[in-house]
Image (cartoon, coloured by chain):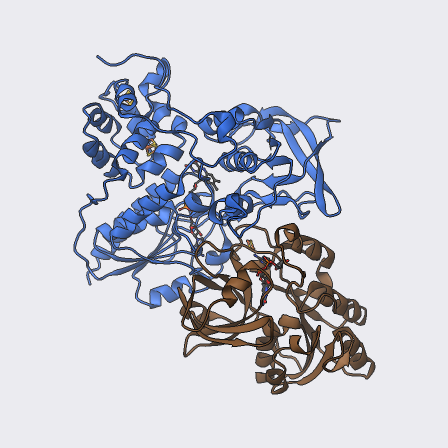
Chain colours: A blue, B brown
C-alpha cells in the first residue's frame, strides 16, 4: 500500500541563519529511512509521466522501487544507464518543470521527491568507486571534445565507453564548466563534482587543460591532427551587461566574475586564497534566474548586510529553481520585484547608488509571459555599494570566429541538426549552452550523449 | 605542468623565464599574452609573451616581482614547473607596413614592446625606441633593443640617459623634426596617458597596451572591461592593444586599483617600473 502523504518527506537542511554565514551544503540529504519513506510515495505507474518529463528519460519508477527494496546498487545502475552525473542532477535539475512536474501525484499534493531520491542513491553509492560501465576495447580512433562542462564531459565519457580515444580540451585550469566556476559550493560541493568527473576520467578520457580552442588551436587544426570528429560543448560563458550608465564603476561585477572569483578561485576563503573579492554592506543583484540567486546567496555569505534581488517581472516569472528561491528568502535575501535599474552612480569611482524604475505587468508577449511596462513617475534611488549583473550569458565568439563553415544564429548559438547535434561543418558536432543559450545541466548532458551516439554511428559506418 | 627551461635575473625586481609550452609557442604572435598560475590554487595572472621559439616550443615571459603571484613565480628555478600556463590570448598587435615607428617602453613594459619592434624591424621598418625607468637598473632589454633600433633612455634619477621622463625625450624628438608613422607605447597607465597627451594633438597614431585586472583572459568574466571610444570592450579578447586616442585612461586607472587595499605591498607600481613617467 503506497504512502498517501500529500507532502514530500522533508530533507534536513542547515538552519538558514547559520548557513547564510558558511559555504557548506544547505540541503543535507535523506537518511536510508527517509529515502525509503519517500520512495513509498511512488505509485509505480504504468503510464510513466515522470519519465517523459526527464530530458534523459531516467527509468524513475524502476529506480524508486529498487530504493524501496534497499537495493541501492541496483537503483544506481538503473539511474546511470541514462544519466552519468546523478549526484549533480539530483541537486540542480529544475525538477518542478521536469520529472516532478509531470508526476501523477501533483494532481493532489506534492510530487514524489524524485530529485532528492536520485541524489540519495548517488551519494550512497559515491563511496563505491568500481565503475560499472562496460568499456568496449579501444578502437584507436581519435575524437576531440571542446569544453569540459556537462555537455563535453558526457559526450567524452560516452565515446570513451564505445572505445574511442577521446581528448577533452578545456580553456580553464579546472574541468567541470559551470559546475565548477558557477554553481556555488553550498549548493553543489566541489569534491562531489570532482568525484563524478573522476569516474569519467577513469573511462580513459585524456584531459588537456589550459587549451583555448580558437586561440591555442583551431577546429581545423584539430582535424588535421587526426581527430576524426569534434564535439563543441563550450557553453554560454560571455556575460551580458545592461548598457546603462555606470556599469564600469568599481564595485560592479558580472555574475560570472563574482561567482568565478568566489567558486573557482576560492575567494570565499580569502585571505587564505590569493584571489580577492570586493563585497560591500549593501549588494544589489540584477536578474531572477539561478545565477542571480547564487550570486545573492554568495554575497550574503561573504558578509553583506543587505542583499537585494532586483527583477523586472513578478515572482511568478522568476526563472530560478523553486527550491533556490525558497532558500534565498529563508536566508534573508530581499526581493525587489517589478523593478528595473536604469543607471548606476558612484562617488570617487565606486558605486554609491542605483536608479530604478517600477514596472507593471502588461499584455503577454511572444513568449507568453506578461511583458513588464514602466510605471510612470516611479524612478527612485537605492543605496548600494556592490552591483552584480546576472541578466544572462551568450556563447563566446572565440570558436565561431575561427571556424569557417560553422553556421551560427544571430545571437551566436551554433546551428545544429537536433537529431544528431551535427553542425553545418562536416564531422563537427555541438551541444549544450553553446547551442541552446543558457539552459540546464541535464539538457547539456542529453545533448552530449546524443552527439556521442551520432558520432559513433557516423564513424562506425566509415570504417578504419 | 609547464617546465621552466631557463631563468635569468634582469635586475633586482625583474626576471625572465623561458617555459616549455607547446600550444602557446606554436600559435602566438607579438602583442599576445598568457595567463599563469604559479602553483595549484593560485591567482590567475596575465603576462605578455616576450619572445617565443616555434622549434623548441618555448615561450619567454618577463615579469616584475610586485606581489603575491609574481613572488611565487620568482621563487621557482630552472627545472621547476608552473602549474598553469594558458594562451596565447588577446589579439596580435596590428603591425602593418610602416616606414618609421617610435616605441616607448616604461619599466617592464619594455618586455612586451620588444617582440613588436623586433617584428617591425624584421619587416624593414625603421624603429626608434625610448626606454624609461626609475633608475638605471629598471631599464631592461637595452642591448636587445639596440640591435634592432636607435635607443634613447630616460631615468627619473638620471642614473642612466637623460634625467626625466620618456615624454621629455618624445617631445624633444618631435621638436627636432623626426616624423613617425606610429607610436607604440607600453608601460604604466600614467605614462601611456602622458604620451597620448602629446601625440594626440599632433595626430601621430598611437597604440597603447592596457593591463586591467583579469581572471580568465577568455572573455568570460568581464572584469577586464575598458572604455574605448565610449564603448565597453573586454581587454582580454578585444585587446590588450588599443588606439590610445580612444582610451579612457582615468577609468582604467581607477579600475586597476579596485583591490588596492587587498594587495598589501609597499609600492603600487603596476606594469611599469616607475610611479610616474
Ligand atoms: C551560476 C549558475 C547557476 C546555474 N544553476 C543551474 C541549476 O541549478 N540547474 C541547472 O540545470 N542549470 C543551472 N545552470 C545552467 C547550467 O550550469 C548550464 O546550462 C550548463 O552548465 C551548460 O553546460 P555546457 O556543458 O553546455 O557548458 P558549460 O558548463 O558552460 O561548460 C563549458 C566549458 O567549456 C569551456 N570552454 C569555453 N570555451 C572554450 C574554448 N574556446 N576552448 C576550450 N574550452 C572552452 C569552458 O571553460 C567550460 O568549462 C546554472 C548556470 C550558472 C552560471
Ligand atoms: C595583458 C596584460 C599583460 C601583462 N604583462 C605583464 C608583463 O609582461 N610583465 C609584468 O611584470 N606584468 C605584466 N602585467 C601585469 C601583471 O599581470 C601584474 O603585475 C600581476 O598580476 C601582479 O600580481 P601579483 O600577485 O604579483 O601582485 P599584486 O600585489 O596582486 O598586484 C600588483 C598590481 O598588479 C595588478 N594586478 C593584480 N592582479 C592582477 C590580475 N589578476 N590581472 C592583472 N593585473 C593584476 C594590479 O594593478 C595590482 O595593483 C600584465 C597585465 C596585463 C593585463
Ligand atoms: S535527471 Fe533531472 S529531470 Fe531526470 S529524473 Fe533526474 S532529477 Fe529528474
Ligand atoms: S509519475 Fe510519480 S508516482 Fe508515478 S511512477 Fe512517476 S514518480 Fe512514481
Ligand atoms: S579577463 Fe575575464 S573577460 Fe577578460
Q: Nearer the viewer, residue A180 or B206?
A: A180
Above or below: residue B186 compared with residue A77:
below
Q: Is residue B9 left or right of residue B20?
A: right
Pinpoint residue B45: horizontal percent, then vertical percent: 54, 59
Q: Which of B212 and B81 is in front in this view?
A: B81
Quarter holding the C terminus of chain A is bottom left
Q: In which quarter of the image is residue A173?
A: bottom left
Pinpoint residue A41: horizontal percent, then vertical percent: 28, 17
Q: Is residue A339 left or right of residue A429?
A: right
Above or below: residue A163 compared with residue A318:
below
Q: Which residue is drawn at 61% across and 24% down?
A: A361
Q: Is residue A301 left or right of residue B268?
A: left
Q: Which residue is drawn at 60% across and 32% down?
A: A307
Q: Which residue is drawn at 23% across and 26% down?
A: A67
Q: Is residue A384 visible?
A: yes
Q: Is residue A41 left or right of residue A260?
A: left
Amino acid at each position: 500500500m503506497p504512502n498517501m502523504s500529500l507532502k514530500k518527506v522533508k530533507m534536513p537542511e542547515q538552519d538558514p541563519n547559520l548557513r547564510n554565514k558558511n559555504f557548506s551544503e544547505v540541503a543535507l540529504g535523506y537518511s536510508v529511512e527517509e529515502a525509503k519513506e519517500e520512495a513509498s510515495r511512488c505509485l509505480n505507474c504504468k503510464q510513466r509521466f515522470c519519465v517523459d518529463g526527464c530530458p534523459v528519460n531516467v527509468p524513475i519508477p524502476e529506480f524508486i522501487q529498487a530504493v524501496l527494496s534497499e537495493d541501492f546498487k541496483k537503483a544506481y545502475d538503473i539511474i546511470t544507464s541514462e544519466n552519468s552525473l546523478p549526484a549533480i542532477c539530483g541537486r540542480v535539475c529544475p525538477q518542478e518543470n521536469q520529472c516532478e512536474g509531470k508526476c501523477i501525484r501533483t494532481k493532489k499534493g506534492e510530487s514524489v521527491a524524485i530529485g532528492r531520491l536520485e541524489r540519495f542513491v548517488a551519494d550512497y553509492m559515491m563511496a563505491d568507486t568500481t565503475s560499472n560501465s562496460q568499456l568496449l576495447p579501444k578502437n584507436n580512433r581519435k575524437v576531440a571534445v571542446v569544453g569540459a562542462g556537462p555537455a563535453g564531459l558526457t559526450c567524452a565519457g560516452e565515446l570513451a565507453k564505445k572505445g574511442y580515444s577521446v581528448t577533452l580540451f578545456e580553456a580553464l585550469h579546472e574541468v567541470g564548466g559551470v559546475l565548477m566556476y558557477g554553481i556555488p559550493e553550498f549548493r553543489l560541493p566541489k569534491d562531489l563534482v570532482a568525484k563524478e568527473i573522476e569516474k569519467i576520467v577513469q573511462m580513459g578520457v585524456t584531459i588537456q587543460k589550459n587549451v583555448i580552442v580558437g586561440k591555442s588551436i583551431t577546429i581545423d587544426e584539430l582535424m588535421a591532427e587526426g581527430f576524426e570528429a569534434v564535439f563543441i560543448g563550450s557553453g554560454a560563458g560571455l556575460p551580458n551587461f545592461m548598457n546603462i550608465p555606470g556599469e564600469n564603476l568599481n564595485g560592479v561585477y558580472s555574475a560570472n566574475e563574482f561567482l568565478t572569483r568566489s567558486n573557482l578561485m576560492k575567494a570565499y576563503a580569502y585571505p587564505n586564497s590569493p584571489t580577492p573579492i570586493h563585497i560591500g554592506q549593501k549588494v544589489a543583484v540584477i536578474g531572477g534566474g539561478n545565477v542571480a540567486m547564487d550570486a545573492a546567496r554568495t554575497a550574503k555569505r561573504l558578509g553583506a548586510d543587505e542583499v537585494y534581488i532586483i527583477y523586472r517581472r513578478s515572482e511568478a516569472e522568476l526563472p530560478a529553481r523553486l527550491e533556490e528561491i525558497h532558500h534565498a528568502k529563508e536566508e534573508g535575501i530581499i526581493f525587489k520585484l517589478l523593478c528595473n535599474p536604469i543607471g548606476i552612480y558612484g562617488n570617487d569611482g565606486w558605486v554609491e547608488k542605483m536608479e530604478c524604475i517600477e514596472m507593471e505587468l502588461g499584455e503577454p508577449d511572444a513568449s507568453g509571459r506578461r511583458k513588464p511596462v514602466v510605471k510612470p513617475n516611479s524612478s527612485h534611488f537605492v543605496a548600494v555599494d556592490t552591483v552584480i549583473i546576472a541578466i544572462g550569458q551568450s556563447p563566446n565568439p572565440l570558436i565561431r570566429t575561427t571556424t569557417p563553415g560553422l553556421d551560427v544564429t544571430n545571437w551566436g548559438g551554433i546551428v545544429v541538426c537536433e537529431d544528431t547535434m551535427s553542425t553545418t561543418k562536416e564531422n563537427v558536432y555541438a551541444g549544450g549552452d553553446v547551442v541552446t543559450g543558457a539552459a540546464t545541466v541535464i539538457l547539456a548532458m542529453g545533448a552530449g550523449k546524443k552527439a556521442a551516439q551520432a558520432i559513433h554511428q557516423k564513424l562506425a559506418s566509415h570504417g578504419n | 605542468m609547464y617546465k621552466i627551461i631557463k631563468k635569468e635575473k634582469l635586475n633586482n625586481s625583474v626576471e625572465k623565464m623561458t617555459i616549455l609550452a607547446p600550444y602557446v609557442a606554436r600559435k602566438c604572435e607579438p602583442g599576445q599574452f598568457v595567463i599563469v598560475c604559479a602553483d595549484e590554487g593560485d591567482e590567475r595572472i596575465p603576462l605578455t609573451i616576450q619572445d617565443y621559439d616555434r622549434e623548441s616550443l618555448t615561450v619567454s615571459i618577463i615579469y616584475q616581482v610586485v606581489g603575491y603571484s609574481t613572488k611565487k613565480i620568482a621563487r621557482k628555478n630552472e627545472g621547476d614547473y608552473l602549474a598553469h600556463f594558458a594562451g596565447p590570448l588577446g589579439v596580435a598587435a596590428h603591425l602593418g607596413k610602416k616606414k618609421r615607428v617610435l616605441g616607448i617602453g616604461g619599466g617592464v613594459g619594455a618586455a612586451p614592446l620588444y617582440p613588436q619592434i623586433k617584428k617591425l624591424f624584421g619587416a624593414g621598418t625603421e624603429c626608434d625606441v625610448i626606454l624609461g625607468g626609475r633608475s638605471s637598473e629598471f631599464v631592461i632589454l637595452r642591448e636587445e633593443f639596440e640591435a634592432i633600433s636607435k635607443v634613447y633612455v630616460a631615468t627619473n634619477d638620471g642614473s642612466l640617459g637623460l634625467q626625466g621622463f620618456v615624454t621629455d625625450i618624445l617631445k624633444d624628438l618631435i621638436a627636432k623634426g623626426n616624423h613617425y608613422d606610429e607610436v607604440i607605447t607600453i608601460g604604466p597607465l600614467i605614462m601611456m596617458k602622458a604620451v597620448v597627451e602629446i601625440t594626440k594633438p599632433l595626430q601621430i597614431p598611437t597604440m597603447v597596451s592596457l593591463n586591467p585586472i583579469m581572471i580568465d583572459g577568455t572573455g568570460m568574466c568581464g572584469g577586464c572591461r575598458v572604455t574605448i571610444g565610449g564603448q565597453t570592450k573586454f581587454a582580454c579578447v578585444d585587446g590588450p592593444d588599443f588606439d590610445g586616442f580612444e582610451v579612457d585612461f582615468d577609468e582604467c586607472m581607477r579600475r586597476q586599483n579596485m583591490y588596492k587595499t587587498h594587495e598589501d605591498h609597499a609600492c603600487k607600481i603596476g606594469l611599469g617600473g616607475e610611479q610616474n613617467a
